[in-house]
Image (cartoon, rainbow, N blue to C red):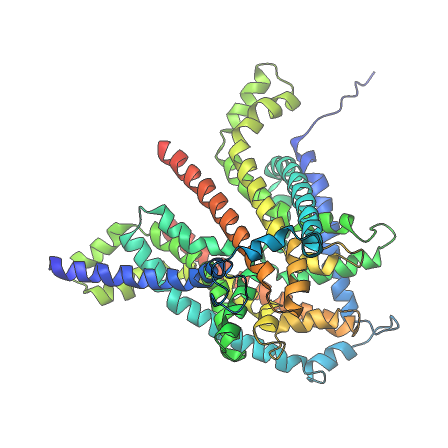
Amino acid sequence: MKKFKFRFSRRAFAYPYMIFLLVFVVVPLVIILINAFLDDNGKLTFANFAEFFTDAGGGLTVLGNSLIIGLVTTVICLAIGYPCAYLLAKYHASSRVLVLLFILPMWVNFLIRTLSTKAIFMALDVKLGMGTVLFGMVYNYLPYMILPLHTTLVSIDHSYIEASEDLGADKISVFLKTVLPLSLSGILSGVTMTFIPAISTFAISEILSSSKIFLFGDAINMHFSKTTNSFGVGSVMSLVMLVLVVVSNVIVNLTSKDEEVKSAL
Amino acid sequence: MKRKNLVARICADGYLGLVLALLYLPILLIIVFSFSGSSRFSFSNGFTLDSYKQLFDPELNAGLLSALKYTAILAVSASVISTVLGAFSTIGIYALGRRLKKITLTVNQLPMINSEVVMAVSLMVFFSAFSFIFPQGMTRLIISHVAFCTPYVVLSILPRLQRMDPNMYEAALDLGANPFSAMIKVVFPYITPGIVSGFAMAFTLSLDDFIITQFNKGDTGIETLSTYIYEDARVKSLEPFWFAVFSIFFVVMFTLLLVANIKKTSKEVKK
């Protein structure tokens, strides 16, 4: 008689989660994809794409504006954050608490921080508009820029810097030719951690501009709200956002892989 | 030369101090003026605890208390479920074949890298398409929170598992343990630090979430702390009541995070 024995495999532990991911992560995105091709009556159409890409509802303009605001936010964050991370790594490498102080605001709910800044702007009679929105964005995303930059800069082997000094490089070329290239992966992940949330955020621009400035995240939110109910165009916009996310992550992954290969050689 | 270094160092510290001031100024101002009893950032009424007294006014705090209750229920259940799910599945994922492992880990990354708005609307559309299975309310919220928390749990456990000597599990089997007890007695104790930090991560993420909750709360009247703040303080301007709430929030949050991180650091130093 053949002996029947249930072979217990550790792999089986992964199956429930794989199903979970399939149902609650992949399928919802597929539904968004399908929705993008359907009109209000559930018929196949390309009208949603046409409406978005011909800018009929102003969606493309909003995307353009968001990309610009996202870019400006990212550049300011990098300009403030890189020196911060660099100086922290150089002078305070052993002081973890100081680094922590730069990261902590990240864990206070962004609505609380944004509403606090708004209250202060209003008390100071600052006119709410582009300036205040940019301030709010930088204020919110700066820690996300400093964290990955600091992680990379601290892990740079100091002997590289000494070697380039010994070989006669002055301070500026040590920075430009040694430190900067070695921190490229940190820059890229900092940029993605700032740029992607910055263009797709909703609420920050709404609160800090009294709903005057409208970003891509606000636009997606509006298309899915009950009053407008234009899921099709909203789905197209979500897909555009998804493409941006995937592209930026592929770029980050490629560079970090390059580095792994380089360091292995 | 030495003097030049000192000047550079002072400049560096000055710059760092300036950025820190920028990061903390709004928070400090809110805390200071929570004692003014007004939302105009002036002490025209003098020093007063009026804002804090309002916290005990049942008319004002009813919404807040119910939001706190839902936030706690949601954060506890979502983080417990995602920690259990994450711990078991990481062990499974680790044992998967190369291809399947790569696919699973890539999909696992999706909720982490994806824009929150996109994840939120995709879940919303999914839930309303299958509303006969997923009723509005807590069910949807817990599922969506588990969906964005578990990937972090998996990624905090996986590195520890990869560092573990596979011979330890094999040795347990050779010594007569069955696979299940080998798992409980050998593998789990080894990955416990990963499980703990994964749990802490999931809990904070769930507590902090706004966008995914806002889209999936439906109209059953459930509000979490962040959606309640959004609905209430966005419409009216920030009232003194909120100054007190925010101040308490800041202080509690910072103390917890500082204590947790300093403890972690001193532990690592000991090792």
Q: Residue furthest left?
A: B1
Residue B47 at x, y = what percent?
Answer: 47, 59
Q: Quadrant of the C terminus of chain B?
A: top left
Q: Closer to the camera, B197 or B233?
A: B233
Residue at position x 41%, y 34% in the image:
B267
Q: Is residue B160 left or right of residue A94?
A: right
Q: Provide residue A148's location: percent of width, then percent of height.
A: 43, 56
Identify the residue shown where x is 78% and y is 75%.
A228
Observer able to see residue A172: yes
How far from the left and from the top, in percent, is residue A253? 50, 58
Q: Is residue B109 visible?
A: no
**Residue B102 appears left or right of A51:** left
Q: Quadrant of residue B81?
A: top right
Q: Quadrant of the N terminus of chain B?
A: bottom left
As rendered, which of A203 and A232 lies closer to the eye? A203
Percent from the top left, x then y, of residue B187?
A: 56, 27
User: Position of B160 compared to B229: left or right?
Assistant: left
Residue at (48% x, 71% y) in the render = A135
Q: Nearer the viewer, residue A142 or B237?
A: B237
- Count of marks overlaid on the render: 0
Residue B59 drawn above or below residue A196? above
Residue, far front: B45
